Image (spheres, rainbow, N blue to C red):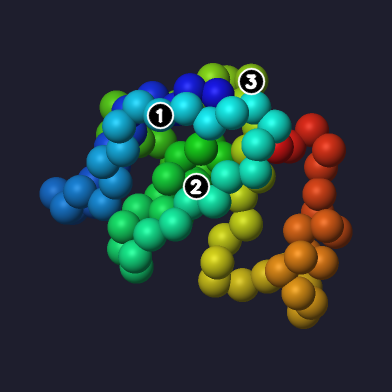
Amino acid sequence: MIIPALKKTYNGKTVLDCPETGIRDGSITAICGHNGSGKSTLGKILAGIIKDDNSKTPDAKLRVGYMCQSSLPFRMSVKRNLLLNADKELS
């Protein structure tokens, strides 16, 4: 999948400035970075929860799973939460 260059600002502060990049279909990809580096913002844009400043989104046919970091739906491990909510069409 090709992710277009994305930028997101809040109140004039840039929280995400990501160049165009690609992720191999079917791969498992980790997004790593320091606090405040834009990881959650990128995840929300890819999942279609929010739009970037230019209203660019990846391919409309793309389906991305997103689990927020603040709380898990059920009191069990992250792995069990992911397996419980797994969708074979998501990659």
Q: Is residue 1 above or below residue 40?
A: above
Q: Is residue 74 left or right of residue 20?
A: right
Question: Which amino acid type corresponds to the residue marked 3 in the rendered image?
Answer: Lys
Is residue 37 at all visible to an observer of this figure? yes
Q: Position of residue 3 (x, y in %)?
A: 44, 27
Q: Which residue is mark 1?
A: 21
Q: Secondary structure at mark 1?
A: strand
Q: Which residue is mark 3?
A: 61
Q: Which residue is mark 2?
A: 43
Mark 3 or 1, nearer chain start: 1
Q: Position of residue 59 (x, y in %)?
A: 54, 20
Q: Is residue 15 left or right of residue 87?
A: left
Q: Is residue 45 above or below residue 30?
A: above
Is residue 56 at all visible to an observer of this figure? no
Q: Position of residue 51 (x, y in %)?
A: 40, 36
The quadrant of the rendering that contains the N terminus is: top right
CA–CA distance in space, label 2 to label 1: 14 Å
Mark 2 or 3, nearer chain start: 2
Mark 2 or 1, nearer chain start: 1
CA–CA distance in space, label 3 to label 1: 17 Å
Q: Is residue 10 left or right of residue 32?
A: left
The residue located at (20%, 48%) in the rendering is 14
Badge 1 density bin: few <14, some 14–19, many ≥20, Cα 10 Å: few
| Callout 3–callout 1 Cβ contact below 8 Å | no
The residue located at (52%, 43%) in the rendering is 49
